Image (tube, rainbow, N blue to C red):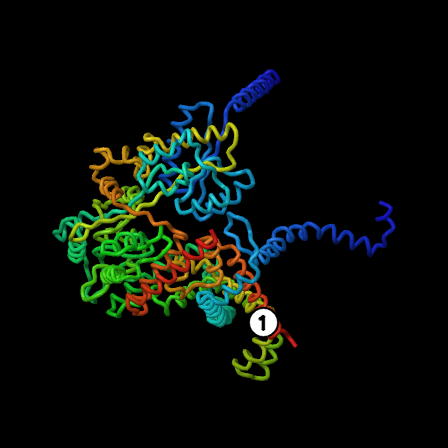
Amino acid sequence: MAIQGLKALAFGAATSAAALLASAANAVEIEYWQYFFDARVQAMEQLIENFQAANPDITVKMTHFPYADYRTKVAAAIPAGEGPDVVQLFYGWLNDYVAAELIQPLPADAFPAATIDAEFFPMVQAMKDGDAYWALPTAVRSLALFYNERLLEEAGVEPPTTLDEMVAAARAMTKVDGAGNITQVGITAGMTAQDHHWWREVLVRQFGGEPYVDDYKTVAYNSDAGVAALDFYVGMAEGDEPITSFGFMDEPQAAFKAGRAGMHIDGSFRIGSLNNTRGLKWGVTELPATNDGTRSNYSSYWVNAITTKAEGEKYDAAVKFMQYITSDEAMQVWLDVVGELPAKPSVGLTDANANDPVFGPFIKGLAYANTTKFANESGQRQLMVEMVERITLQGMSPAESLAIAAEAEQKLLDDYYASN
Amino acid sequence: MTLYRNLSIRQKQIVWAWAFLALPVLFYSVIRFYPTGNAILISFQDWNLLGDRTWAGFDNYAKLMADPVFWKVFQNTFVYLLLGTPVSLVISFVIAYHLDKLRFMHGFLRMLYFLPFMTSAVAMAWVWRWFYQPVPIGLFNNFLASVGIPQVNFLNSTTNALPSILAPAVWAGLGFQIIIFMAGLRAIPKSYYEAAKIDGVSTWTVLWEITLPLLKPTIVFLVVFSSIGFLRIFDHVFNMTSQNPGGPLNSTKPLVLMIYQTAFNSFDMGYAAAQTVVLFLVLLVVSLLQLRLLRDR
């Protein structure tokens, strides 16, 4: 009996293994890579499930790892014929990926450039080369002003719509202890967070300047407008009644989450983690305009591309998968799960999304947003961080510090474009 | 086989020794010597990790010499070394010296001193980072504020940040140094002390003439070991300044952190490799120098 049972078990195992092999022979498996960010992974799992249900002969295997290792692993894997068939990359990395022949252009029949030009937000055209797109985003992000509803109510102020109102509201919400130490800031500040985008693309323009000219190859913020924008920014933490403090509670978003900051400028990707913060009642509004109504915003995005590793039937499957993850349906899933905004106005600017109290301000911001073409984002951010530190820690004048930053950034850009 | 049989016993021993050594030699060649050689090669090339490597000659080294950030970082690295090594050695010797004489709760105290050494450097750096924050969350500044003393900018200062980061790094290494010192103290023969007692010499003389000279091998080991540790300091700095690594204004940035940023933020592998070669030479020179200076004559 025992031997009979064993035989049956062996037979069963053999047939099921054969069945598995048979089905594997028909199926195409493609690999998708992205960096680890909980909400993005969840959204992609949902998309893969939907895609596989519609295309039973294709399986998609998602691999993700920490952001810090991402670029290194992709660079090492694709030339070795290992890595992904479809890969996610930051828009700023595209030139490097194209130059290194890690990705191939999207096929014109499945992704006609004219249709994409017409349907996607215009900033996506940075991914176009001649008649072909190299990559496409599922979602885009922009900035907005988060506010703490309780603190606003306590101070008796309304969510601000202009910079002057913002400063007044922040002043009303700032608290100091007996020794003059700030214990609650009106608005968070720190170039290490999203403020360098706010300063570069929003404040400089609002004070009448241009951050860069010549397709972001030439620094132009070393102007009177740039000095005025920097004065305004650093001035928030100075004077008799500062409304903020650099490095307050270590990180701007931590101060806002802890309810110790009245307002906080951040991207749409922060929505998820704020929703998970217990006891925080927050709202969000568009970035404040100037008194004459000048507005600007910064947008960025991650794109998906087909790698040079994908060939034959894997290539066909990868094209199908790319079509799905840039579809309207995928964009809505991405918005609902990650909080990143659809890359097509037709999906993003639906009445329901544009009037959404949470997503609305970000989506409105997209209409007047600028996308900085970074050569080295962390390096360029570091220069902004140091520009402020020279003023706050070493007492340098804003004009002088700005000139040093502009010169250093120009050198960085020149070096980058000289070698690419 | 006949070849092997014809060997003398001495030669057979050598063959066997090499047979057993083959594995570690192979292992070291693949994971140590080959990457080291490759790093030296890359330091003469331009490479952004994705594209082709192109020959650059001494360009990366010339860039290094002309880079003010590199010299600032070079200086910081030596400040970590020159402050960290003597301070940690003196403190650990004082503690070990007294702990050695103590019998009451000896094991427990020794464990307390050793505990930080076993703790993850990352976790410790983050806890200290929060200790150092301004009010309302920083432990130290909250205490200062509560007794009416103005706040101290620990990390957000170009002068205070480096010592502030060094303090937990020294504290974390104490446990190990204390254990080594105590082992060194135990190894000194009791008879010397008994002889000194009979002659009636003072405690200071015993310390200067017997304990310290006989501890010399221990001291040499610890100086070299902790110097290499401070020259390679990274995790404390990176985690305590992760928003602005090595900041503010590069005042805390050690060479290893600069290498990391050049390689994995700027993807300038050639330049990073050139910095690595410089760090390697510095480590080599410092270690050789210390061994020579502290060696028994």
Camera-nearest residue between A146 and B126: A146
Residue situated furthest front in the rendering: A130
Image position of A106 (left or right of A329): right
User: Which x, y percent locates residue A56?
Assistant: 44, 23
The N terminus of chain A sits in image quarter: top right
Eyeballing the image, is A205 above or below B75? above
Camera-nearest residue between B245 and A273: B245
User: Which x, y percent locates residue B221?
Assistant: 58, 67
Residue situated furthest left in the rendering: A156
Camera-nearest residue between A214 and B225: A214
**Disc 1 secondary structure class:** helix
Residue A130: which quarter of the image? top left
Eyeballing the image, is A61 above or below A399? above
User: Which x, y percent locates residue B249?
Assistant: 38, 64
Q: Does residue B219 appear in the picture of this structure?
A: yes
Chain letter of the residue beneath label 1 in the structure image: B
Eyeballing the image, is B55 above or below A6? below
Image position of A396 (left or right of A28): left
How many residues crowd around disc 1 within 10 Å: few (fewer than 14), some, or many (20 or more)? some
Task: Give the number of marks.
Answer: 1
Q: Does residue B135 appear in the picture of this structure?
A: no
* Residue pictured at 36% horizontal, 56% vertical: A218
* Residue pictured at 37% horizontal, 36% vertical: A42
Camera-nearest residue between A56 and B68: B68
Q: Amino acid at mark 1?
A: Gln
Look at mark 1 in the image and give the residue it sits on.
Answer: B290
User: Which x, y percent locates residue B4?
Assistant: 84, 48
* Residue pictured at 38% horizontal, 54% vertical: A217
